[in-house]
Amino acid sequence: MRLARAIHFDESDTRVYPVPARTGEWCISGGFEFSNWTEADLAGKARQAFSNGWFGLETTGRVTFVAVTQIEPVELERLTDMLAEHFVTYYGAPDLVAARPVAAEELGHMAEMCDEHAANTLLTVSRELTEVGVRESFRVIEAQDADLGQFAIHGSLEE
């Protein structure tokens, strides 16, 4: 089974998101956060989180890129519990028993998407508000084998 972890190529996420996700933390789309948003909510860093941010399960921060990687079932169970607790604390779920199936569904959707791709594949998310709610689309950046020629320095050691 696969899921996705936050990955950073530079420090830009620390400047564009209200709370940046931590490198290496497990992530899901997290579109549920925006289910009641309107155009009035789309300003500044919140707009960036809405437009392009994956949801970090540990920090509840956002990240622009995630990388597909293996996850162990016991870790997935821990994340399901963590997300269910988040739903109770922040979204008004009545209790963990009611929240856990919804959390499992969110993680299952992400795992299903990730299982379609090889390890180290990068994913991005893009969202827009429509008349019927939030529309998400995903971009896949395939992992490529590094070619030694990309790193070799060509030339002569003789003057």
Image: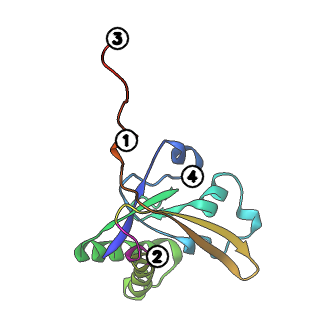
Measuring from the top left, give residue 112's x and y in whole percent: 41, 80
Query: What distance separates the C-alpha of mark 3 from that of mark 1?
Result: 23 Å
Q: Secondary structure at mark 2?
A: helix
Q: Residues within 10 Å of mark 1 (few under 14, many from 20)?
A: few
Gap between marks 2 and 3 measured at Cα: 67 Å
Q: Is residue 115 magenta?
A: yes
Give the mark nearer the N terminus: 3 vs 4: 4
Q: Which residues are magenta?
A: 113-118
Name the residue that disc number 4 marks.
18
Q: Secondary structure at mark 3?
A: loop
Q: CA distance from mark 2 to mark 1?
A: 49 Å
Give how far across and how far down residue 157 sits, in percent.
30, 18
Question: Gap between marks 4 and 2, in whole Å?
Answer: 20 Å
Q: Amino acid at mark 4?
A: Pro
Chain-order first, disc 3 or disc 1 = 1
Q: Nearer the viewer, mark 2 or mark 1?
A: 1
| Tally of numbered discs | 4
Which residue is under mark 3? 159
- What amino acid does circle 3 point to? Glu
Q: Which residue is mark 2?
A: 87
Sequence-first tag of 4 and 2: 4
Q: Secondary structure at mark 4?
A: loop
The spot of residue 65 in percent (x, y) is 48, 57
